[in-house]
Amino acid sequence: MSYLYKEMQNEDYAILNSKLKSRDSIDILRFAHETYGKNLVYACSFGAEAMVMLDLLSKVQKDAQILFLDTDFHFKETYDLIEKVKQRYPHMKIKLAKSSLTPEEQENQFGAKLWLTNPDQCCQIRKLDVLEREMAPFDAWLSGLRREQSPTRANTEFINQDNRFKKVKICPLIHWTEEEIWMYIELHRLPYNPLHDQHYPSIGCTYCTKPVMPGQDNRSGRWQGNQKTECGLHAPTKGEK
Ligand code: SF4
């Protein structure tokens, strides 16, 4: 059967996930690679999960296509980490994709500190529009979402119908715990963002990421003081499974 977004119905996702449910992450990556080939891209945040995903992916597809949404507002540590990853996996095609608006143009058009006055619009311009543009040639994308990360991610399946981007979204790490992620990173001596050791469990843009104290929710450091909890890349849409 076809596994293209435009040809799959809701029930096809359920059947496929039921077939794959006892498989492990590397099997899901193999399925993704064999099914979508060059039309598969990993939208990578370079967080802790990403280190695991990149390492697993390197065993399946050395020249995988990786996309990082470079908002222009990331921490220096994140950019440094990307350089380390490029050295460790030299065959991977890592693209840093930017908004068509520079930060200065954004300020001129929408006012200063849009991340404070209208963070949804800021994420739309610097992340969602960029992802939509960059993903246009692909049929499916990989994401490192884990179910335990937040209530909005608790129902994520291996294979998901992504109605926002009209793609198939594949999440091989849904069952991993935070402890397992860190055990894998240590066991394989993977590079990671040093900010994780400074109370930043979830790292995004400098303006919207604060440290989290022990006992607090891992994502509570994102968009502090705002109801926003997701940038919109992974927000479930109507009818999505
Ligand atoms: S996370 Fe903050 S700074 Fe980054 S794009 Fe979204 S609102 Fe803007």
Image (cartoon, rainbow, N blue to C red):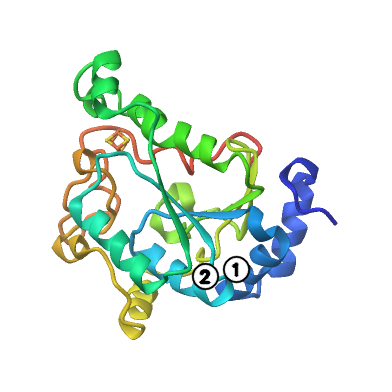
Q: Residue at x 32, y 39 (%)?
A: 71
Give the camera-side residue of 178 and 59: 59
Tell me the CA gap for discs 2 and 1.
Answer: 7 Å
35 left or right of 108 in image: right
Tags 2 and 1 touching, CB below 8 Å: yes
The residue that disc 2 covers is: 57
Q: Residue at x 65, y 75 (%)?
A: 22
Give neighbour class at mark 2: few <14, some 14-19, many 20+ (Cα, 10 Å). many
Residue 182: quarter of image: bottom left
In this rendering, the answer to whether 114 lies above or below 71 is above
Question: Measured from the top left, where is residue 181 in percent x and y?
Answer: 38, 72
Give the camera-side residue of 106 and 151: 106
* Residue kind at label 1, given as amino acid type: Leu
Q: Which mark is residue 29?
A: 1
Question: Measured from the top left, where is residue 198 in percent x and y?
Answer: 14, 62
* Residue kind at label 2, given as amino acid type: Leu
In this rendering, the answer to whether 90 lies above or below 167 is below
